[in-house]
Amino acid sequence: MTDNSQQKARGVVVAALYKFTRLDSFEALRAPLQQVCDGVGVKGTLLLAREGINGTIAGTRSAIDAVLAHICGFPGCADLEWKEAAAATMPFKRMKVRLKREIVTMGIEGIDPNHTVGTYVAPEDWNDLISMPDIVVVDTRNDYEFAIGSFEGALNPQTQSFREFPGWVRKTLKRDNRPKVATFCTGGIRCEKATAFLKEMGYEDVFHLKGGILKYLERIPAEVSKWQGECFVFDERVSVGHGLEPGPFQLCSICRTPFHSGDTSGGYADHPCPHCEVNADTSKKQAATERQHQIELAKKRGQAHIGPKRV
């Protein structure tokens, strides 16, 4: 958890959290959690499932503290950990508490990180681990996330969703010698299941970055970092770099993938990427233009525009 003066000054705190814990009555937790979030003006998305809770929320310091205190009252969540960053403006348009089968969808029955999981590696020890000659470093995120940034030498499974990861492991990694594997993802949650799956597959030396890329970028100075590029985040900052500062990426208004805008302020704006600028058909360009018009009208009214679902 981070609680610094910069966050207080800038006003908006962004908190990313997850916890694998048995929530047998998770359906009953939804309405009270939504009510607490709405009552203090917190926005974002939280997922509830029998296996736990996952999500990212944003709000004032006191509002975030109120929601986190409520979640810490859930079964097994007293020791909840989360990661924080500052944002200049609210990065979400609404608050959603959703019920799911899994808080991160792998689609493999019986994978339980509370039972079997890889070895956690602190950000301060990560560079040494991935520099070892006999280690295989695997980025468990999606292909479009890998495209804008990853660690030196990391393998890209080229997945479009986490459901494809088990198939990639079976097809690509050499089971005959079962190499040492180090995995990483944005905040750590995918690696909980990825390493649990690898252990179930017979890999013994399995590691994952504790706190994910976000914790690494928060703690490790750029001058000694092995991270290259930017880290995609699922809110209107679009990407962050070292120190969790917003980066120069935005989402394409047509294909909804991140692209380098050339604007160091970064952030979410409705403009097409270079590919769509040239190749998108007229109807898609017109739809994007109309959406931008609606956003501008909403701003003039002092309202948040509820846009289409993001990537």
Image (spheres, helix red, strand yellow):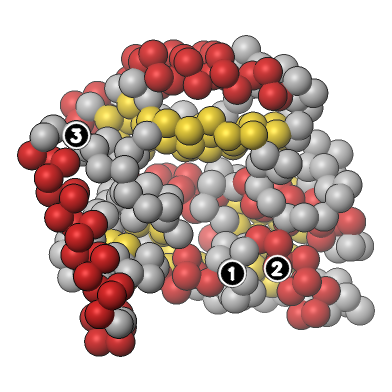
Contact (Cβ within 8 Å) of mark 1 with mark 3: no
Quarter of the image that includes the C terminus? bottom left
Mark 1 against mark 3, which lies toward the viewer?
Answer: 3
Q: Nearer the viewer, residue 233 or 100?
A: 100
**Circle 3 crowding by C-alpha within 10 Å: few under 14, some 14–19, many from 20:** few
Q: Work out whether residue 243 can be spotted.
A: no
Q: Nearer the viewer, residue 126 or 73?
A: 73
N-terminal of the two: label 2 or label 3?
2
Residue pictured at 78% horizontal, 42% vertical:
113
Quick one: SS at disc 1? loop
Q: On the image, numbered disc 2 is attached to which residue?
A: 164
* Amino acid type shown at disc 1: Gln
Residue pictured at 62% horizontal, 12% vertical:
73
N-terminal of the two: label 1 or label 3?
1
Q: On the image, numbered disc 3 is attached to which residue?
A: 303
Residue 108 in the image: above or below residue 161: above
Q: Position of residue 96 (x, y in %)?
A: 48, 33
Left or right, 311 with respect to 292, comes to right
**Circle 1 crowding by C-alpha within 10 Å: few under 14, some 14–19, many from 20:** few
Q: Nearer the viewer, residue 169 or 89?
A: 89
Contact (Cβ within 8 Å) of mark 2 with mark 1: yes
Q: On the image, numbered disc 1 is attached to which residue?
A: 160
Q: Position of residue 99 (x, y in %)?
A: 64, 34
| Quadrant of residue 305 within the rendered picture | top left
Q: Residue furthest left?
A: 300
* Amino acid type shown at disc 3: Gln
